[in-house]
Image (cartoon, rainbow, N blue to C red):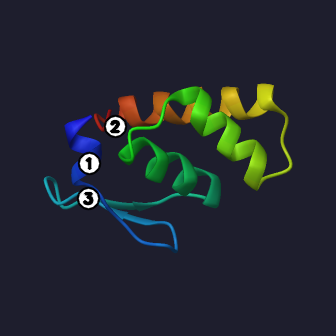
Amino acid sequence: MPRLHQLALSDEGFVFDPQTGDSFQVSTTGMVVMHSLKEGRSDEEIAQQLVAHFEVSLEEARRDCTDFRGQLKNFGLD
């Protein structure tokens, strides 16, 4: 995920892509997923982290992670 590693992330959910100059905002959940992906964590590790931080089931966390990764792919950031 080289493109993902280039993104600048703020603690407030602001994301900047220096390659394109685009910026966008993500939710708190999205920030957890993005930071975890940049750290090289697996989808299962990320889902476990979401369960620990938020009141969600493991199934829901897995689904959220998969959906978010799909969105990153749609934006060419995977």
Q: Which residue is mark 1?
A: 5
Q: Tell me the CA gap for discs 2 and 1.
A: 14 Å
**Which residue sits at x=45%, y=53%?**
35
- Count neighbours of disc 1 (C-alpha within 10 A) and say few if under 14, some if 14 to 19, many if 20 or more: some
Residue located 17% across and 60% down the image: 18
Q: Which residue is mark 2?
A: 75
Instruction: Please report the residue visible at 86 percent of the width from the left and 49 percent of the height from the top.
Output: 55
On screen, residue 78 versus residue 14, left or right, reads left
Closer-to-camera residue (78/41): 41
Q: CA distance from mark 1 to mark 3?
A: 15 Å
Question: Residue 58: percent from the left, percent from the top?
Answer: 79, 30
Query: Left or right: where does residue 56 sit relative to residue 19?
Result: right
10, above or below 7, in the image: below
Q: Nearer the viewer, mark 2 or mark 1?
A: 1
Residue tagged 3? 22
| Residue 62 sits above or below residue 46 on the image | above
Label 3 to label 2: alpha-carbon separation: 11 Å
Query: Which amino acid type is marked by label 1?
Result: His
Q: Quadrant of the N terminus?
A: top left
What residue do we see at 83% from left, 42% from top? Answer: 56
How crowded is the residue under tag 3: few (<14 C-alpha within 10 Å), some, or many (20+)?
few
Q: Amino acid at mark 3?
A: Asp
Dot 2 falls on a residue whose secondary structure is loop
Determine whether the residue tagged by mark 1 lies in a helix, strand or loop. helix
Q: In the structure shown, which secondary structural element does the residue marked by tag 3 occupy?
A: loop
Q: Height in image: 12 above or below 49? A: below
Q: First in sequence, mark 2 or 1: give its number.
A: 1
Q: Quadrant of the C terminus?
A: top left
Residue 63, picture quadrant: top right
